[in-house]
Structures are given as C-alpha cells and as structure tokens.
Image: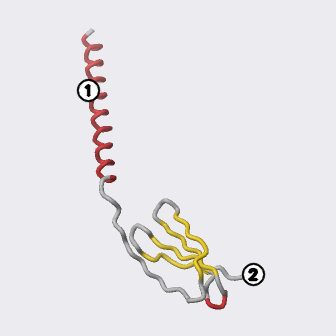
C-alpha cells in the first residue's frame, strides 16, 4: 500500500512539474510577440528601363522582387531581400531562351 501511495505522489509531482514547464514555455513565447516589428530599410539600384513585375514574401522573412524589361539592360531578374534584417541577399538573372 505504501508503494502505491508513493507512486501516486510521484506521478502528481511529475504532472505539476510538467504543467509548470508548459506555462513557462507559453510565457516565454508570449514575450517574443509583444513588441511591434522594427522597420528596416534596404536599397538596391536597378536600371531605369526595368519595371517591378511581382513581389512575393515567403513568410520566413525572405522578400522576392521580380523585375521585367529589356534583357540587354539586365532587367529580367529576381532580387532577394531579407525583410527582417533589411539586407540584400542576392540576384538571380533570368536570361531569355
């Protein structure tokens, strides 16, 4: 009988500790959601003949800008930006076939 009592008490302690960890994790996640996101700025020059054809965000902070225009002036490209840091990540040229 004593062993059963000890087992029940041990399980109760584990349940209380587990619930405490769940609450701690929720509070920690909520702290990250509080502040408004910081606005960052990124600049990249493009030829005058280029037009912005499409903008896509992937949900993880990557912003893709597709340029259209004359191939000779380097307008057919995709520009990659890190929207969270405001960094220019790269350029993918899309040559004509």
Query: In the image, what residue occupies the spot 66% across and 87% down?
Result: 70
Q: Which residue is mark 1?
A: 13
**Residue 17 image position (x, y, % from top left):** 27, 32
**Quadrant position of the C terminus in the picture:** bottom right
Query: Would residue 5 appear left or right of 70 to someone viewing this image?
Result: left
Mark 1 surroundings: few (<14), some (14-19) or many (≥20) residues within 10 A: few
Please tell me the numbered disc located at residue 36: none
Front residue of 34 and 2:
34
| Left or right: 14 as drawn, with respect to 55 | left
Element type at mark 2: loop
Of pointers 1 and 2, the one earlier in the residue sequence = 1
Q: Residue at x 42, y 77 (%)?
A: 42
**Residue 97 disc label:** 2
Picture coordinates of residue 66 (x, y %)? 59, 75
The residue lying at 39 percent from left, 70 percent from top is 85
Residue 59 at x, y percent in the picture: 49, 59
Q: Image quadrant for the N terminus?
A: top left
Q: Are marks 1 and 2 in contact (CB under 8 Å)?
A: no
Q: Nearer the viewer, residue 46 or 20?
A: 46
């Amino acid at each position: 009988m004593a062993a059963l009592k000890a087992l029940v008490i041990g399980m109760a302690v584990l349940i209380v500790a587990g619930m405490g960890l769940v609450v701690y994790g929720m509070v920690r996640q909520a702290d990250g959601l509080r502040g408004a996101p910081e606005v960052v700025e990124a600049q990249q020059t493009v030829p005058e003949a280029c037009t912005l054809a499409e903008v896509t965000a992937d949900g993880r902070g990557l912003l893709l800008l597709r340029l259209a225009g004359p191939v000779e002036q380097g307008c057919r490209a995709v520009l990659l930006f890190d929207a969270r840091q405001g960094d220019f990540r790269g350029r993918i040229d899309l040559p004509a076939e």
